[in-house]
Image (tube, rainbow, N blue to C red):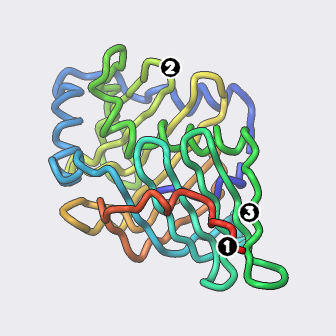
């Protein structure tokens, strides 16, 4: 699931290495492949792997100094590998951010009249959206793990949210690193950490309140941290997989005919 891309924090490089240093020794009791396969099965197996489109609606909360600083309704549409449309706010007051490959637009409600304002998205913001999609949990576990030059290892065990977890480390061909903390009891992910090869920032997500939609287990609560600082909490309400998006959903509104 995607969040408001405008929210971003940085801490010292020392903290980054501390966060990504395993607390236990890698163990041979469960192979990485076995842990990963059990997680995929718990998430829905083939139904999970066959997902190409996701639609999530709900509300998100932003945080500053551990206090809520903002809240907004949202609807997030993703079509893998490189399309996303995120709507913020109520129906008549929606701000829409659209990314389609290397193109992107921001659509804001009209100030006067009935024509929404459409502006091209800056290249840096487009790249950030694409990076978030392609290094995110849903994309990596479906489309990256079994590709050449991607490594998957068991990095030991850790206690997370009072749950004993197996820790998987995935490093893609670009050397981006993902750590997945898999609950030994439910085989569902409890926490995911990400660090891109060209960055020192650690992004972290905690998952809770799991429900099944279209055969796929889905966390309705996702809490996001950046370098250990809580920045956002997402509370999803409705989720749909492979609903069949029209291509026009990922295009800017057409100008009115004269």
* Of callouts 3 and 1, the N-terminal one: 3
Q: Quick check: 251 left or right of 108? A: left
Residue 253: percent from left, percent from top: 62, 66
Of tags 2 and 1, the one toward the viewer is 1
Please say if the residues under marks 3 and 1 sit with CB atoms less than 8 Å apart. Answer: no
Find the residue positioned furthest to the top. 149
Choose between 181 and 125: the one closer to the eye: 125
Mark 2 element type: loop
Q: Which residue is mark 3?
A: 118
Residue 160: percent from left, percent from top: 40, 48
Residue 174: assigned label? 2
Q: Residue at x 83, y 80 (%)?
A: 111
Q: Which residue is mark 1?
A: 257
Q: Quadrant of the C terminus?
A: bottom right
Residue 164: percent from left, percent from top: 30, 46
Q: Residues within 10 Å of mark 3 (few under 14, many from 20)?
A: some
Choose between 42 and 257: the one closer to the eye: 257
Q: Residues within 10 Å of mark 2 (few under 14, many from 20)?
A: few
Of tags 2 and 3, the one toward the viewer is 3
Mark 3 element type: strand
Can you say whether 127 is above or below 175 in the image? below
Residue 42: assigned label? none
Residue 220 lies in quadrant: bottom left
Q: Residue at x 57, y 29 (%)?
A: 196
Please say if the residues under marks 2 and 1 sit with CB atoms less than 8 Å apart. Answer: no
């Amino acid at each position: 699931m995607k969040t408001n891309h405008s929210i971003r924090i940085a801490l010292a490089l020392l903290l980054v290495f501390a966060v990504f240093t395993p607390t236990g020794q890698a163990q041979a009791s469960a192979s990485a492949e076995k842990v990963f396969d059990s997680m995929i099965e718990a998430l829905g197996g083939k139904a999970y792997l066959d997902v190409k489109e996701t639609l999530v609606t709900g509300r998100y909360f932003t945080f500053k100094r551990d206090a809520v600083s903002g809240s907004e309704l949202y609807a997030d549409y993703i079509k893998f590998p490189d399309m996303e449309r995120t709507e913020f706010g109520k129906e008549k007051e929606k701000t829409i951010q659209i990314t389609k490959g290397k193109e992107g637009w921001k659509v804001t409600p009209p100030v006067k009249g009935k024509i929404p304002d459409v502006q091209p998205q800056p290249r840096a913001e487009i790249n950030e959206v694409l990076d978030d999609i392609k290094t995110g949990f849903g994309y990596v576990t479906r489309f990256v793990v079994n590709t050449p030059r991607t490594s998957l290892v068991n990095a030991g065990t850790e206690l997370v949210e009072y749950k004993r977890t197996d820790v998987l480390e995935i490093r893609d061909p670009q050397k981006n690193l993902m750590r997945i903390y898999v609950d030994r009891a439910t085989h569902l992910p409890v926490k995911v950490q990400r660090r891109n090869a060209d960055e020192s920032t650690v992004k972290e997500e905690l998952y809770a309140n799991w429900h099944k939609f279209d055969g796929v287990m889905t966390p309705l609560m996702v809490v996001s941290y950046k370098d250990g600082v809580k920045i956002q909490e997402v509370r999803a309400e409705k989720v749909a997989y492979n609903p069949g998006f029209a291509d026009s959903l990922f295009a800017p509104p057409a100008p009115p005919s004269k």
